[in-house]
Amino acid sequence: MTTYAARCNGRARPRTVVVWGLIVAVLLVLGVSFEAGANDFGLVLGGTDLFPLQETPIRMVSEEIRFRLDPKRSLWSVAASYRFQNPTKERVCLQVGFPEVEGTPLKAFKTTVRGKTVAHKSVSLAHPIDALPPYISDVYVYSTCFAPGETVDVVHRYTHMRTDNGTADDLMYVTVTGALWSGPIERARFVVLTPIAPWAVEYLDQIPLVSSVEHPSKSSGGMSQLVFEATSWTPTKDFSVKLLGPSEVIGSQGLKCPAWAEVIDGVTNGTLGHSLASYSDEQLKVCRNAVYGVHGRSFADAGINRGLYGAPSPVKGTDTLRVGFRKNAAFAPSLLTPEERTYLSALRAEEKVRSSSPPGE
């Protein structure tokens, strides 16, 4: 997984993690010729330089990419699993490449083919290749062969540092190269695991969010799992997902709430009443319920549920959808973080001052 600062889809990406999914680095077909299709592609290894070749019979049957965030170590762990098939009656040998971005090397990179670790080497590109973005500088290359009709599983595992700007995680996985294999991908699945529950999620419309759940951890807090899937898919765009924090959601979509820092400072300095004076009783109620909404609590009041949980909506001027709070069948009070408990306590204290019975739930 590779982090870089760039502009994607016409908007700045403050924290972008780019992962290049298996690009065919070569196709060396032994004893058989093919008709080149429009989506067929390969790169022939010649010394340390790569150059393009326009034919491959190998299919990518499926891919599952799992991202797991460790915020304490500021680290993303990635497991990229692919299943390929040789539909021909001939043996096919090839070299497969996995690129990385210049200046941001992958760590603990390991490849297994058929469950066995394979040796690979990093090849530097002496000059740009049209099929690759200009920021690709090196490619991990390894060799494998397919028996006639054989299906082969390939897994990459590695880690990459997380760039933290305190507002959002922006993941991008370059999937357009999947169209360079023969035929559509039967199933593409992307799983994002994070202990920081997102207040909202933006994602590519081609790869919809099919599941969102947050499970309680052994202590306080939890682990959110977001699953995105596409089937019978010929990618024309890259997978991307943006995990938004409260600072990017509060103040938008009609949610006017006190900022986290504003409330914490008010508690610390004894000026909470002054900090919250400009917010109505109804706004405090909505903001309090929103803290539960980020973890997917289902309320007895149907009106609160309707106000918190809604269908995805298009993000104007982009090819992405945005969904806010998502109901969570695994909700438990232990999902609340210490910061969220402080925020809730502060709002309830203000409500208690204004009324002997806080409104809402």
Image (cartoon, rainbow, N blue to C red):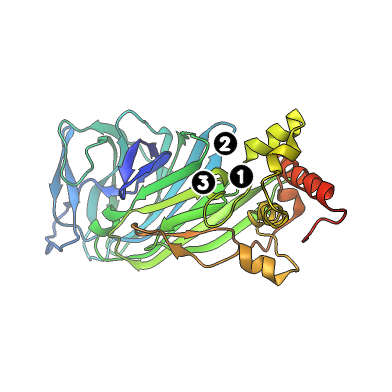
Q: Secondary structure at mark 2?
A: loop
Q: Residue furthest bottom?
A: 302
Does residue 177 appear left or right of residue 52 in this picture? right
Image vertical order of residue 15 relative to residue 216, above or below: above
- The percent position of residue 98, horizontal first and vertical second, equals 31, 42
- The percent position of residue 328, horizontal first and vertical second, equals 65, 61
- Binning the other alpha carbons within 10 Å of mark 2 as few (below 14), some (14 to 19) or many (20 upward) gives some
Q: Amino acid at mark 2?
A: Pro
Picture quadrant of residue 82: bottom left
Q: How far is mark 1 from mark 2, CA to CA?
A: 8 Å
Judged by depth in the image, the label closer to the viewer, 2 or 3, is 3
Q: Secondary structure at mark 3?
A: helix
The label number, if any, that marks residue 272 in the structure image: none
Residue at 67% in and 46% down: 278
- Binning the other alpha carbons within 10 Å of mark 1 as few (below 14), some (14 to 19) or many (20 upward) gives some
Does residue 344 appear left or right of residue 228 in this picture? right
- The percent position of residue 203, horizontal first and vertical second, equals 43, 56
Residues at badges 1 and 2 in contact (C-beta under 8 Å)?
Answer: yes
Picture quadrant of residue 341: top right
Q: Which residue is mark 3?
A: 248
Q: Which residue is mark 2?
A: 71
Residue at 67% in and 64% down: 329
The mark that comes first in sequence, 1 or 3, is: 1
Residue at 72% in and 38% down: 274
Residue at 57% in and 54% down: 225
Picture quadrant of residue 338: top right
The mark that comes first in sequence, 1 or 2, is: 2
Does residue 282 appear left or right of residue 136 in this picture? right
The label number, if any, that marks residue 195 in the structure image: 1
Q: Nearer the viewer, residue 56 or 284?
A: 284
The mark that comes first in sequence, 2 or 3, is: 2
